[in-house]
Amino acid sequence: MIGIGYDVHRLAEGESLVLGGVTIGSPLGSIAHSDGDVVLHALCDALLGAAGLGDIGEHFPDTDPRWKNAPSRMFVEHAIHLLAENGYVLVNIDITLILEAPKIKPYKEAMRAEIASMTGLQIQRVSVKATTNESIGFAGRKEGVAALCACMIKHGDDA
Ligand code: MG
């Protein structure tokens, strides 16, 4: 089964920017109730979506003080736990990050390693890609950062 996820956060000066569990050196950071990690939020929705288990907003409402400034790794680990409880095994993850600046290349391997460690996947099964938005739209104007994620899961009963 396939899952997709998408997330956006607004960017502002003086906020920290955490993507894929890695702190990025940037003058702009994401405004959020949690740590605002769009990569992990999109991943979480892809995982939940693949198993038909709802979405991140249902499991971790931003009105709940327990999740204030929460590391998004907790959301991903909970989603992985729910998959396991329902008999699913994660096969692979493919992420696209949409961000005008800074360049993500120096951080990609660290993000893959972080995501591999929180999902239990081999690093070869975690793909992290990035693109600019060609200076157009909210991402292009550096008003926000977005991430897309696809994942494949299989049920333990399937061959
Ligand atoms: Mg989010």
Image: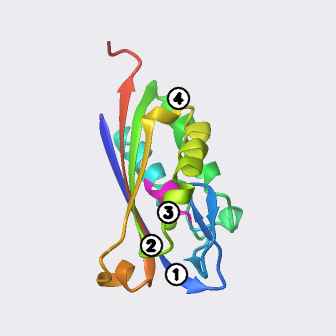
Decide which of tag 4 and tag 3 comes sooner along the chain: 4
- Please give the residue where the numbered disc 2 appears in the rendered image: 145
Cβ at disc 4 under 8 Å from ligand 1 = no
Residue 85's label in the rendered image is: 4
User: What colour scheme has been applied to the protein in the rendered image?
Assistant: rainbow
Nearer the viewer's eye, disc 3 or disc 2?
A: 3
Of pointers 2 and 1, the one earlier in the residue sequence: 1
Left/right of residue 53 with respect to residue 110 in the rendered view: left
Give the image location of residue 114, x and y in percent. 61, 45
The Cα–Cα distance between marks 4 and 3, rounded to whole angstroms, is 34 Å
Magenta part of the protein: which range? Answer: 37-42
Specify few, some or many for label 4: CA neighbours under 10 Å numbering under 14, 14-19, or 20 or more: few
Residue at which label 3 appears: 104
C-beta proximity under 8 Å, tags 4 and 3: no
Kind of residue sitting beneath label 4: Glu
Q: Earlier in the sequence, mark 3 or mark 1?
A: 1
Q: Secondary structure at mark 4?
A: helix
Question: Residue flagged by tag 1: what amino acid is it?
Answer: Leu
Q: Tell me which corner region of the image, top left, top right, bottom left or bottom right, holds residue 66.
A: bottom right
Q: Mark 1 or 4, which is nearer the eye?
A: 1
User: Does the magenta stretch mainly form a helix, a strand or a loop?
Assistant: helix
Q: Are marks 3 and 1 in contact (CB under 8 Å)?
A: no
Image quadrant assignment for residue 147: bottom left
Residue 70: percent from the left, percent from the top? Answer: 68, 61
Q: Residue at x 55, y 63 (%)?
A: 37
Q: CA distance from mark 2 to mark 1?
A: 7 Å
